[in-house]
Image: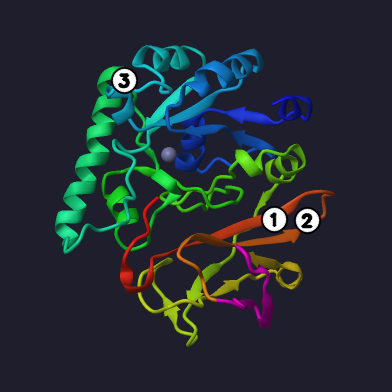
């Protein structure tokens, strides 16, 4: 937070962030949105005094079930009101913090969509009643979303969706798949923080996942037999395309093949079950600043079953 202050980053609230997207007002350079997921009391005890001191607005995505259950280590409704009085915005993180993309055994699309709608709207209603929130913004639990079912469900209800794949945001961002950089645990080092908060949005004309047979696949949630996807990036900036590098979780830097205004990045090994991602960067003319985007992949266990977490 000292780094943001000393280097004149502009920290904006969630409402202002959404306002930029709605009105298509370009973000100032070095604009930052600070968010937290879950309602742990460490946000109240550790983060709030620092953020209040800096006068930085921030957003906390709340899953209300543990708050309703009054679990220790979770903030109370009263503490959440205190956050709101100190530039904090509260938004939706689902009620029960489940893996929203997963179907129960033999569950139809219809039954799934009703179950998920109920969970999301129950949380939204609670936050409206208890905290008078007016935004319609969800942070996906575990950052997990898909293209074909969950994203359209959010869009249908007029919700924005925050995920957890890395990347800087531009006005062209997918409204239901807004990237965020994680800064916790192993991602808590200041050098790493500096590179990420200085990242620039890279707007590829097209990002496509291809199967090992070279055909486009519709979703990044892989439950079938596809274990080696390729990423095809279409970019009408040839020098940036030439400098673009992509890395994959656990596989390092990927082999790249350029054809005209497209680059294909190929995996060297099979994708393991769990969440992984293509992380792509290209240098900019500004020292220490990189264009950055990523493409998440979620791989089930063989046979479409899910691992427990
Ligand atoms: Zn969470």
Residue contact between numbered discs 1 and 2, judged by CB atoms under 8 Å: yes
Q: Residue at x 56, y 67 (%)?
A: 205
Q: Residue at x 29, y 38 (%)?
A: 96
Give the class, few, some or many, for how many residues have Cα within 10 Å of label 1's Cα (few <14, many ≥20). Answer: many
Look at the numbered disc 3 and give the secondary structure of its residue: loop
Tag on residue 291? Answer: 1
Which segment did they paint magenta? 248-269
Q: Quadrant of residue 47?
A: top right
Which quadrant of the render holds ligand 1? top left
Ranked by sequence position, the earlier of labels 1 and 2 is 2
Look at the numbered disc 1 and give the secondary structure of its residue: strand
| Residue bearing the label numbered 2 | 284
Ranked by sequence position, the earlier of labels 2 and 3 is 3
The yes-or-no answer for disc 1 within 8 Å of ligand 1 is: no
Q: CA distance from mark 2 to mark 3?
A: 48 Å
Give the class, few, some or many, for how many residues have Cα within 10 Å of label 2's Cα (few <14, many ≥20). Answer: some
Q: Is residue 308 left or right of residue 174?
A: left
When the figure is inspected, residue 199 is found, relative to residue 88, above or below; the finding is below
Q: CA distance from mark 1 to mark 2?
A: 6 Å
Q: Residue at x 59, y 45 (%)?
A: 181
Tag on residue 70? Answer: 3
Give the class, few, some or many, for how many residues have Cα within 10 Å of label 3's Cα (few <14, many ≥20). Answer: few
Name the colour scheme: rainbow
């Amino acid at each position: 937070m000292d780094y943001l202050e000393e280097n004149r980053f502009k920290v904006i609230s969630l409402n202002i962030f959404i306002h930029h997207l709605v009105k298509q007002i370009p973000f100032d350079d070095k604009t930052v949105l600070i968010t937290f997921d879950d309602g742990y009391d460490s946000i109240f005890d550790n983060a709030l005094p620092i953020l209040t001191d800096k006068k930085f607005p921030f957003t906390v995505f709340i899953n209300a079930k543990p708050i309703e259950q009054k679990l220790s280590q979770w903030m109370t409704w009263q503490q959440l009101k205190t956050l709101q009085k100190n530039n904090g915005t509260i938004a939706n993180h689902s009620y029960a913090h489940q893996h929203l993309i997963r179907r129960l055994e033999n569950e139809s699309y219809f039954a799934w969509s009703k179950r998920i709608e109920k969970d999301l709207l129950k949380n939204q209603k609670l936050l409206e009643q208890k905290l008078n929130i007016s935004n319609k913004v969800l942070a996906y639990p575990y950052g997990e979303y898909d293209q074909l079912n969950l994203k359209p469900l959010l869009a249908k209800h007029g919700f924005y969706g925050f995920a957890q794949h890395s990347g800087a945001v531009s006005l062209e961002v997918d409204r239901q798949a807004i990237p965020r950089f994680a800064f916790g645990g192993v991602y808590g080092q200041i050098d790493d923080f500096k590179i990420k908060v200085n990242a620039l949005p890279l707007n590829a004309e097209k990002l496509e996942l291809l199967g090992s047979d070279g055909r486009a696949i519709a979703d990044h949630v892989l439950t079938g037999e596809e274990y080696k996807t390729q990423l095809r990036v279409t970019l009408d900036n040839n020098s940036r395309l030439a400098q673009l590098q992509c890395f994959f979780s656990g596989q390092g830097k990927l082999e790249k093949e350029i054809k005209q205004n497209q680059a294909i990045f190929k995996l060297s090994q099979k994708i393991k079950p769990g969440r992984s991602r293509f992380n792509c960067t290209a240098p900019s003319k500004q020292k220490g600043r990189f264009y950055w985007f990523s493409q998440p992949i979620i791989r089930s266990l063989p046979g479409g079953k899910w691992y427990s977490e």
